Image (cartoon, grey):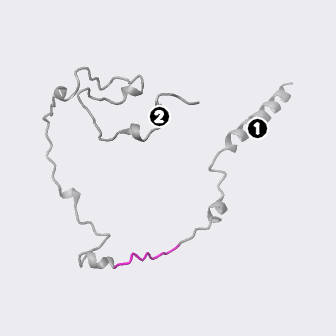
Amino acid sequence: MNNKSLKISMILGLIFANGVFAADPLTEKDETVIHSINYIDEDTDFDLGFDTADYLPEDFDANDIYVNLGAIEFIESDAKVILNTKKYLPEDFNAYAFPTDVEGFNYIDANDEISFDFDTKKHLPNGFDPYIRNN
């Protein structure tokens, strides 16, 4: 009995180990797949209709770096900038408020008045109501 359980345990262990290593991507390399892709290299010269050399400096090199950003010295300061934005925002403005509906996304100042010199009634059918929903 002990011999049978040992054999069954070994068989189950081998099946389990085979299942664990079956999905290992390192064992499933197929070099022929990547080499079977055909790449088309097209060296196309674009004709812009004018010579770009006429509009560039004489010693212009597109691969040359003209500005060295490492040469710029930055001033590090520990001073904190404090801005008082309350005078620019509405009284009940909360930057962390979660908008509950679509109207909550845009703030429209009640003092702003927009007027257009365009009468849409001339261009719409009689009795037109944009708030009527047609299903």
Is 72 on the left-hand or right-hand side of 16?
Answer: left
Q: Position of residue 67 (x, y in %)?
A: 22, 62
Other residues around mark 2 within 10 Å, as few (<14) / some (14–19) / many (≥20): few
Name which residue type carries label 2. Answer: Asn
Is 14 on the left-hand or right-hand side of 83?
Answer: right
The image shows residue 62, relative to residue 76, as above or below, that is below
Q: Position of residue 57 (x, y in %)?
A: 23, 76
The image shows residue 55, relative to residue 106, as above or below, that is below
For discs 2 and 1, the disc positioned in front in the rendered view: 2
User: Which residue lies at the image location 62% right of the left edge and 67% below the top edge?
Assistant: 38
Q: Which quarter of the picture shows residue 4?
A: top right
Q: Position of residue 114 (x, y in %)?
A: 27, 35
Q: Nearer the viewer, residue 81 or 15?
A: 81
The image shows residue 45, relative to residue 84, as above or below, that is below
Q: Nearer the viewer, residue 112 or 88?
A: 112
Which secondary structure class fits the magenta region best?
Answer: loop
Name which residue type carries label 1. Answer: Ile
Is 123 on the left-hand or right-hand side of 31?
Answer: left
Q: Which mark is residue 26?
A: none
- SS of the residue at dot 1? helix
Q: Which quarter of the picture shows residue 52?
A: bottom left
User: Which residue lies at the image location 31% right of the left edge and 70% below the top edge?
Assistant: 62
User: Which residue lies at the image location 29% right of the left edge and 73% below the top edge?
Assistant: 61
Marks 2/1 in contact by CB < 8 Å: the verdict is no
Q: Which quarter of the picture shows residue 35?
A: bottom right
Quarter placement of the N terminus? top right
Residue 19 colored magenta? no
CA–CA distance in space, label 2 to label 1: 79 Å
Q: Which residue is mark 1?
A: 15
Q: Which mark is residue 126?
A: 2
Magenta span: 42-50
